[in-house]
Image (tube, rainbow, N blue to C red):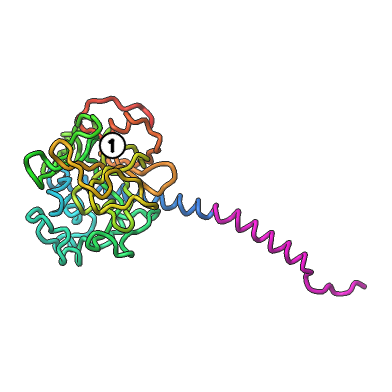
Amino acid sequence: MFGKRGAFTLIELLVVIAIIGVLIALLVPAVQKVREAANRVNCQNNLKQLGLAMHNYHDAHRSLPDGGIDHFSGNWQVTILPFIEQNAMYQLYQGYGTGPTSVVLAANIANVTGKQLVLCTCPSDNPALPGGQTWAKCSYLNYAVNYGNTAVGDAVGSPGTMDVEAMYSGYVYGGAPFRFNQPQRLTDITDGTSNTLMMAEVIQGQRIDVRGFTWWGDAGGFVTSLLPNDPSGDLVNHTYCDNNPPNPPAVSCGSYTITDGRIIRAFAARSRHTGGVNVALCDGSVRFVANNIAALTWQYLGTSQGGETIPGTY
Protein backbone atom coordinates (compact mmCIF):
# COMPACT_ATOMS: atom_id res chain seq x y z
CA MET A 1 0.00 0.00 0.00
CA PHE A 2 1.17 3.51 -0.79
CA GLY A 3 1.30 5.92 2.07
CA LYS A 4 -0.24 9.36 1.97
CA ARG A 5 1.97 12.03 0.46
CA GLY A 6 2.86 14.96 2.70
CA ALA A 7 2.70 18.70 1.90
CA PHE A 8 4.38 20.28 -1.13
CA THR A 9 8.12 20.55 -0.91
CA LEU A 10 9.68 23.99 -1.14
CA ILE A 11 10.93 23.26 -4.65
CA GLU A 12 7.48 22.18 -5.83
CA LEU A 13 5.94 25.30 -4.32
CA LEU A 14 8.48 27.53 -6.08
CA VAL A 15 7.77 25.77 -9.38
CA VAL A 16 4.03 26.36 -8.97
CA ILE A 17 4.60 30.03 -8.13
CA ALA A 18 6.87 30.40 -11.17
CA ILE A 19 4.23 28.83 -13.44
CA ILE A 20 1.53 31.15 -12.06
CA GLY A 21 3.85 34.12 -12.63
CA VAL A 22 4.41 33.10 -16.25
CA LEU A 23 0.67 32.68 -16.81
CA ILE A 24 -0.04 36.12 -15.34
CA ALA A 25 2.71 37.65 -17.48
CA LEU A 26 1.07 36.13 -20.56
CA LEU A 27 -2.46 37.02 -19.49
CA VAL A 28 -2.03 40.70 -18.55
CA PRO A 29 -0.98 41.92 -22.03
CA ALA A 30 -3.81 39.90 -23.57
CA VAL A 31 -6.33 41.47 -21.20
CA GLN A 32 -4.91 44.94 -21.90
CA LYS A 33 -5.12 44.32 -25.64
CA VAL A 34 -8.76 43.24 -25.37
CA ARG A 35 -9.55 46.24 -23.18
CA GLU A 36 -7.93 48.65 -25.62
CA ALA A 37 -9.78 47.07 -28.56
CA ALA A 38 -13.05 47.61 -26.69
CA ASN A 39 -12.07 51.20 -25.86
CA ARG A 40 -11.27 51.90 -29.50
CA VAL A 41 -14.68 50.61 -30.59
CA ASN A 42 -16.34 52.66 -27.84
CA CYS A 43 -14.47 55.74 -29.03
CA GLN A 44 -15.59 55.12 -32.61
CA ASN A 45 -19.18 54.79 -31.41
CA ASN A 46 -18.85 58.17 -29.67
CA LEU A 47 -17.69 59.77 -32.91
CA LYS A 48 -20.50 58.06 -34.80
CA GLN A 49 -23.08 59.55 -32.43
CA LEU A 50 -21.47 62.99 -32.60
CA GLY A 51 -21.43 62.83 -36.39
CA LEU A 52 -25.13 61.95 -36.37
CA ALA A 53 -25.76 64.87 -34.02
CA MET A 54 -23.98 67.20 -36.45
CA HIS A 55 -26.22 66.00 -39.28
CA ASN A 56 -29.34 66.42 -37.13
CA TYR A 57 -28.19 69.94 -36.26
CA HIS A 58 -27.70 70.61 -39.97
CA ASP A 59 -31.22 69.36 -40.72
CA ALA A 60 -32.64 71.71 -38.08
CA HIS A 61 -30.54 74.80 -38.85
CA ARG A 62 -29.59 74.30 -42.50
CA SER A 63 -25.93 74.48 -41.56
CA LEU A 64 -23.33 72.89 -39.33
CA PRO A 65 -22.61 74.65 -36.02
CA ASP A 66 -20.18 77.53 -35.80
CA GLY A 67 -16.72 76.30 -34.99
CA GLY A 68 -16.69 79.05 -32.40
CA ILE A 69 -17.82 82.57 -31.71
CA ASP A 70 -14.53 83.73 -30.21
CA HIS A 71 -12.11 82.47 -27.58
CA PHE A 72 -14.45 82.13 -24.63
CA SER A 73 -18.11 82.84 -25.36
CA GLY A 74 -19.05 79.47 -26.80
CA ASN A 75 -18.42 77.12 -29.69
CA TRP A 76 -19.89 74.06 -31.43
CA GLN A 77 -19.74 72.00 -28.24
CA VAL A 78 -22.36 74.23 -26.63
CA THR A 79 -24.72 74.39 -29.61
CA ILE A 80 -24.62 70.63 -30.22
CA LEU A 81 -25.84 69.82 -26.69
CA PRO A 82 -29.57 69.56 -27.60
CA PHE A 83 -28.66 67.02 -30.29
CA ILE A 84 -26.80 64.70 -27.91
CA GLU A 85 -29.68 64.50 -25.42
CA GLN A 86 -28.36 67.36 -23.28
CA ASN A 87 -31.00 70.01 -23.94
CA ALA A 88 -31.45 70.76 -20.24
CA MET A 89 -27.73 71.53 -20.00
CA TYR A 90 -27.95 73.72 -23.10
CA GLN A 91 -30.80 75.72 -21.58
CA LEU A 92 -28.66 76.44 -18.52
CA TYR A 93 -25.78 77.89 -20.53
CA GLN A 94 -25.49 81.66 -20.09
CA GLY A 95 -24.04 84.27 -22.43
CA TYR A 96 -23.41 82.30 -25.60
CA GLY A 97 -21.79 84.65 -28.09
CA THR A 98 -22.30 87.71 -25.91
CA GLY A 99 -19.30 87.83 -23.64
CA PRO A 100 -15.61 87.03 -23.77
CA THR A 101 -15.66 84.82 -20.67
CA SER A 102 -18.99 82.97 -20.68
CA VAL A 103 -17.33 79.53 -20.87
CA VAL A 104 -15.73 80.12 -17.47
CA LEU A 105 -18.65 81.85 -15.74
CA ALA A 106 -19.24 80.20 -12.37
CA ALA A 107 -22.81 79.27 -13.33
CA ASN A 108 -21.69 77.72 -16.61
CA ILE A 109 -18.92 75.73 -14.94
CA ALA A 110 -21.40 74.45 -12.38
CA ASN A 111 -24.05 73.50 -14.94
CA VAL A 112 -22.34 72.94 -18.28
CA THR A 113 -18.64 73.47 -18.92
CA GLY A 114 -17.58 71.69 -15.75
CA LYS A 115 -19.43 68.49 -16.68
CA GLN A 116 -17.62 65.45 -18.03
CA LEU A 117 -19.76 64.26 -20.95
CA VAL A 118 -19.41 60.51 -21.41
CA LEU A 119 -20.23 60.76 -25.12
CA CYS A 120 -17.37 63.23 -25.58
CA THR A 121 -14.80 61.23 -23.60
CA CYS A 122 -12.49 58.55 -25.00
CA PRO A 123 -12.10 55.71 -22.47
CA SER A 124 -8.44 55.23 -23.44
CA ASP A 125 -7.41 58.72 -22.34
CA ASN A 126 -6.46 59.95 -18.87
CA PRO A 127 -9.19 62.28 -17.56
CA ALA A 128 -7.83 65.69 -16.55
CA LEU A 129 -10.72 66.89 -14.41
CA PRO A 130 -10.22 64.84 -11.22
CA GLY A 131 -6.90 66.57 -10.61
CA GLY A 132 -8.62 69.96 -10.49
CA GLN A 133 -5.87 71.42 -12.67
CA THR A 134 -7.94 72.29 -15.74
CA TRP A 135 -8.78 75.83 -16.76
CA ALA A 136 -10.99 77.16 -13.93
CA LYS A 137 -11.98 73.52 -13.29
CA CYS A 138 -13.77 73.21 -16.62
CA SER A 139 -14.14 69.72 -18.06
CA TYR A 140 -11.67 68.55 -20.67
CA LEU A 141 -12.98 66.29 -23.43
CA ASN A 142 -11.66 64.23 -26.35
CA TYR A 143 -13.25 65.26 -29.65
CA ALA A 144 -12.60 68.31 -31.79
CA VAL A 145 -13.92 69.58 -35.11
CA ASN A 146 -11.96 70.10 -38.32
CA TYR A 147 -10.66 73.66 -38.66
CA GLY A 148 -8.88 72.91 -41.92
CA ASN A 149 -5.30 72.59 -43.09
CA THR A 150 -3.68 75.74 -41.72
CA ALA A 151 -4.09 77.12 -38.18
CA VAL A 152 -6.31 79.14 -35.87
CA GLY A 153 -5.49 82.79 -35.25
CA ASP A 154 -6.74 86.16 -34.07
CA ALA A 155 -7.87 88.01 -37.17
CA VAL A 156 -5.55 90.81 -38.30
CA GLY A 157 -6.82 94.21 -37.16
CA SER A 158 -9.62 92.69 -35.07
CA PRO A 159 -8.29 91.70 -31.63
CA GLY A 160 -10.33 88.89 -30.08
CA THR A 161 -11.94 88.00 -33.40
CA MET A 162 -11.06 84.47 -34.44
CA ASP A 163 -10.40 83.05 -37.88
CA VAL A 164 -9.18 79.74 -39.23
CA GLU A 165 -7.19 81.04 -42.14
CA ALA A 166 -3.96 81.88 -40.34
CA MET A 167 -0.96 81.00 -42.47
CA TYR A 168 1.13 78.30 -40.84
CA SER A 169 4.17 76.55 -42.29
CA GLY A 170 3.31 77.88 -45.75
CA TYR A 171 0.03 76.00 -46.20
CA VAL A 172 -2.71 77.65 -48.23
CA TYR A 173 -6.13 77.49 -46.60
CA GLY A 174 -8.48 75.23 -48.56
CA GLY A 175 -11.73 75.72 -46.66
CA ALA A 176 -13.03 73.79 -43.67
CA PRO A 177 -16.41 72.47 -42.49
CA PHE A 178 -16.06 74.49 -39.25
CA ARG A 179 -15.11 78.15 -39.03
CA PHE A 180 -15.58 81.05 -36.63
CA ASN A 181 -18.83 82.98 -37.05
CA GLN A 182 -19.35 81.45 -40.48
CA PRO A 183 -21.60 78.37 -40.26
CA GLN A 184 -20.95 76.04 -43.18
CA ARG A 185 -23.48 73.95 -45.06
CA LEU A 186 -22.82 70.43 -46.22
CA THR A 187 -23.29 71.70 -49.77
CA ASP A 188 -20.36 74.06 -49.17
CA ILE A 189 -18.11 71.00 -48.91
CA THR A 190 -17.32 70.85 -52.60
CA ASP A 191 -14.55 68.29 -52.05
CA GLY A 192 -17.27 65.83 -51.03
CA THR A 193 -18.44 64.82 -47.57
CA SER A 194 -16.74 61.42 -47.87
CA ASN A 195 -13.42 63.16 -48.56
CA THR A 196 -13.52 65.72 -45.74
CA LEU A 197 -12.87 65.22 -42.05
CA MET A 198 -15.57 66.34 -39.64
CA MET A 199 -14.11 65.42 -36.25
CA ALA A 200 -11.12 63.67 -34.71
CA GLU A 201 -9.75 62.77 -31.32
CA VAL A 202 -7.61 65.04 -29.16
CA ILE A 203 -5.86 64.32 -25.85
CA GLN A 204 -6.82 65.84 -22.52
CA GLY A 205 -3.87 67.84 -21.22
CA GLN A 206 -2.73 67.05 -17.70
CA ARG A 207 -1.82 69.66 -15.10
CA ILE A 208 -1.63 73.23 -16.44
CA ASP A 209 -2.41 72.70 -20.12
CA VAL A 210 -5.13 73.88 -22.51
CA ARG A 211 -5.19 70.86 -24.81
CA GLY A 212 -8.47 69.00 -24.43
CA PHE A 213 -10.20 72.20 -23.26
CA THR A 214 -12.63 71.80 -26.13
CA TRP A 215 -15.12 74.34 -24.75
CA TRP A 216 -12.48 76.94 -25.65
CA GLY A 217 -12.69 78.16 -29.24
CA ASP A 218 -9.09 77.42 -30.20
CA ALA A 219 -8.80 73.94 -28.66
CA GLY A 220 -12.25 72.96 -29.91
CA GLY A 221 -10.70 72.15 -33.26
CA PHE A 222 -7.73 70.40 -34.84
CA VAL A 223 -5.83 71.19 -38.03
CA THR A 224 -4.26 68.92 -40.63
CA SER A 225 -1.08 70.93 -41.08
CA LEU A 226 0.01 68.63 -38.24
CA LEU A 227 -0.14 64.84 -38.68
CA PRO A 228 -2.05 62.59 -36.27
CA ASN A 229 -0.02 62.43 -33.03
CA ASP A 230 2.53 64.67 -34.71
CA PRO A 231 5.89 64.38 -32.90
CA SER A 232 6.84 67.94 -33.87
CA GLY A 233 4.35 69.22 -31.30
CA ASP A 234 1.26 71.42 -31.15
CA LEU A 235 1.70 75.16 -31.61
CA VAL A 236 0.17 76.23 -28.31
CA ASN A 237 1.28 79.86 -27.84
CA HIS A 238 -0.28 79.99 -24.42
CA THR A 239 0.97 80.32 -20.86
CA TYR A 240 -1.45 77.56 -19.85
CA CYS A 241 0.73 74.83 -21.30
CA ASP A 242 2.71 71.84 -20.03
CA ASN A 243 4.67 69.79 -22.55
CA ASN A 244 5.99 67.26 -20.03
CA PRO A 245 4.82 63.62 -20.34
CA PRO A 246 2.20 62.27 -20.47
CA ASN A 247 1.20 65.42 -22.34
CA PRO A 248 2.08 65.58 -26.04
CA PRO A 249 4.93 67.84 -27.20
CA ALA A 250 4.27 71.54 -27.74
CA VAL A 251 5.96 74.45 -29.49
CA SER A 252 6.02 77.98 -28.04
CA CYS A 253 4.72 76.48 -24.83
CA GLY A 254 4.21 79.17 -22.20
CA SER A 255 4.49 82.18 -24.49
CA TYR A 256 2.49 84.29 -26.93
CA THR A 257 4.22 84.42 -30.31
CA ILE A 258 2.94 87.01 -32.75
CA THR A 259 3.05 86.00 -36.41
CA ASP A 260 1.87 88.37 -39.12
CA GLY A 261 0.19 90.55 -36.52
CA ARG A 262 -1.74 87.74 -34.85
CA ILE A 263 -1.45 84.96 -32.35
CA ILE A 264 -1.56 81.61 -34.14
CA ARG A 265 -2.26 78.17 -32.68
CA ALA A 266 -2.34 74.74 -34.28
CA PHE A 267 -3.53 71.59 -32.50
CA ALA A 268 -3.04 68.10 -33.95
CA ALA A 269 -5.47 65.20 -33.80
CA ARG A 270 -4.15 62.94 -31.01
CA SER A 271 -5.15 59.84 -29.09
CA ARG A 272 -3.92 57.25 -26.58
CA HIS A 273 -4.73 54.45 -29.04
CA THR A 274 -1.77 52.60 -30.48
CA GLY A 275 -0.74 53.76 -33.93
CA GLY A 276 -3.29 56.41 -34.85
CA VAL A 277 -6.56 58.26 -34.18
CA ASN A 278 -10.25 57.73 -34.74
CA VAL A 279 -11.96 60.22 -37.05
CA ALA A 280 -15.43 60.97 -38.37
CA LEU A 281 -15.91 62.13 -41.95
CA CYS A 282 -18.55 64.61 -43.01
CA ASP A 283 -20.68 61.84 -44.54
CA GLY A 284 -21.06 60.38 -41.04
CA SER A 285 -18.68 57.45 -41.51
CA VAL A 286 -16.02 56.68 -38.89
CA ARG A 287 -12.60 55.15 -39.36
CA PHE A 288 -9.16 54.76 -37.80
CA VAL A 289 -6.33 56.75 -39.40
CA ALA A 290 -2.74 55.66 -38.87
CA ASN A 291 -0.07 58.07 -37.67
CA ASN A 292 1.99 57.32 -40.79
CA ILE A 293 -0.66 58.55 -43.22
CA ALA A 294 0.95 60.52 -46.05
CA ALA A 295 1.17 64.19 -45.08
CA LEU A 296 -0.48 65.41 -48.29
CA THR A 297 -3.34 62.93 -47.92
CA TRP A 298 -4.01 64.12 -44.38
CA GLN A 299 -3.89 67.76 -45.48
CA TYR A 300 -6.28 67.05 -48.35
CA LEU A 301 -8.72 65.39 -45.94
CA GLY A 302 -8.65 68.60 -43.89
CA THR A 303 -9.84 70.87 -46.70
CA SER A 304 -13.47 71.22 -47.75
CA GLN A 305 -12.93 73.27 -50.90
CA GLY A 306 -9.38 72.44 -51.94
CA GLY A 307 -10.26 70.45 -55.04
CA GLU A 308 -7.61 67.79 -54.32
CA THR A 309 -7.87 64.14 -55.22
CA ILE A 310 -7.78 61.82 -52.20
CA PRO A 311 -5.93 58.52 -52.73
CA GLY A 312 -8.19 55.48 -52.70
CA THR A 313 -6.75 54.06 -49.49
CA TYR A 314 -5.30 55.62 -46.36
Instruction: Return the residue at label 1.
Output: 224
Q: Residue at x 60, y 55 (%)?
A: 25
Task: Find residue 81 and report its image quarter.
Answer: bottom left
Query: Residue 16's quadrant in the figure?
Result: bottom right
In this rendering, position of residue 225 left or right of residue 101: right
Other-residue count near label 1 (Cα within 10 Å), few / some / many at <14 / 14–19 / ≥20:
many
Relative to 106, does residue 33 appear above or below in the rendering?
above
Q: Which residues are magenta?
A: 1-30
Question: Disc 1 marks which amino acid?
Answer: Thr
- Residue 38, x across and y down, in percent: 44, 52
> Dividing the image into 4 quarters, which one contains the C terminus?
top left
Q: Position of residue 50 (x, y in %)?
A: 27, 49
Q: Residue at x 13, y 49 (%)?
A: 70
Identify which residue, 202 or 234, lies in the foreground.
234
Q: Is residue 157 magenta?
A: no
Q: Is residue 149 left or right of residue 127?
A: left
- Image coordinates for residue 180, horizontal then vertical, percent: 14, 43
What secondary structure is found at the residue carrying circle 1?
loop
Residue at 16 percent across and 34 percent down: it is 188
**Quadrant housing the N terminus:** bottom right
Picture quadrant where residue 146 is located: top left
89 relative to 257, above or below:
below
